[in-house]
Image: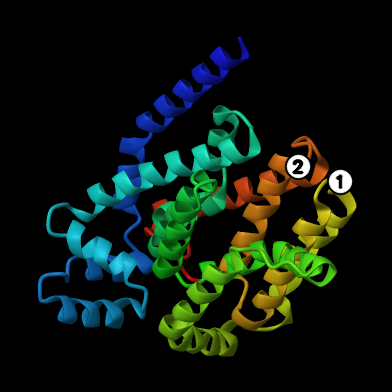
Amino acid sequence: MLNKRYKVSSIVSLLMLLWLIPVIYYISVIYSGGDQISYHDAYYSMNNGMVQNYLKYNLLLGSFEFVHFLTISAASQFFEKNIFFTFINFIFLISGIYAVSKNTLRPYWLICILFLSNYYVHVLLFSAERLKLGFLFFFLAMIFYKTAYKKYFFIIMSILTHFSLIGLYAALSTKPTIDSLKRFFRYGRIPLIFFPLTILIILATIYIAEPILIKIIAYKEDYGGLSNVIQLSSLILLGYIYAKNNKSQLLIFLLVIMFMAFFVGDSRLNMFGILYFQYHFLKYERIFSIPFILLSIYIFYKLIDFYIFTFLYGDAFYGL
């Protein structure tokens, strides 16, 4: 009986998302300002050789990551931009809802509602195009987390789509790394996964160290400072008071994110912190707890402003 209800809720959620496809397309057309101006120009500039296209892409977006570049290079030859990214947005939503539902054991309909009422999900859908693709690969890594080679393939793809996801993975892996080091010093055993990961980190560093350093310096000059850690500090306090299960993982994650926010600004890192806070409470705590409810109301309230500015100016961040 329970299994039947679960299947019904899954079908209802899928139908809801299918119904939203024309809405997603309509909003994609309206959302034509802000970062989308550069993304639009880049998408329709992919009509020369690969090297020329990449140089133009880098000039327009200031991006070194090449997965998004390869994606729009191929897609722009066959599809109008809004049609293609409506399809990507649909896959993003399906993958994200499935990944979170699978890992938290919460019903699809609940995750669907939480996704659609989440300000940051809408930012990813219509504004942060490269980061959305990065999160799509992140969701696929969550779905295939039991299959090592698939999981690490999608992790690498997500990083090569948007370097900021290195911060997310660093925060997620800090607590497991500390636990592994404790076991090593106690028992003298190094996990087998340590060796391929070390090789992977070395190779990745060779490729991405310079562009990441350039971005960190630029962000530190423009956005770094103590003011960036206020929101994350509030999350740490709420987590410390209300989290009952796996509290250390939550607090260490938020502390690492807060440390990075001090240096490179809080725009994306606040997103990482809030989304993980919600995920933690979905997986380990009661969703009717005070912090989960307050946070859900807060990010829904931000969503209202997002659409007021989108319909007025074609840009949710107009004037910011």
Q: In the figure, 167 relative to 205: above or below?
A: above
> Which label belongs to residue 284?
2
Residue picked out by circle 1:
244
Q: Residue furthest front?
A: 188
Say which residue appears at 48% left-offset and 59% top-offset. Answer: 152
Cα distance, mark 1 to mark 2? 8 Å
At mark 1, the secondary structure is loop
User: Residue 289, image x and y in percent?
Assistant: 81, 39
Q: Are marks 1 and 2 in contact (CB under 8 Å)?
A: yes
Instruction: Identify the residue at horizontal 47%, vertical 72% (top origin).
Output: 163
Vertical placement of residue 159 versus 148, above or below: below
In which quadrant will I find the N terminus?
Answer: top right
At label 1, the amino acid type is Lys
Q: Quadrant of residue 87?
A: top left
Q: Which mark is residue 149?
A: none
Q: Is residue 90 left or right of residue 81?
A: right
Quadrant in which residue 76 is drawn: bottom left
The residue lying toward the viewer, choosing from 46 and 205, is 205
Residue 89 left/right relative to 279: left
Q: Is any atom of residue 142 visible in this view?
A: yes
Q: Residue at x 67, y 44 (%)?
A: 296
Q: Residue 207, how many percent across, how many down?
A: 41, 82
**Front-most of 190 and 241?**
190
Type of amino acid under label 2: Tyr
Q: Residue furthest right?
A: 241
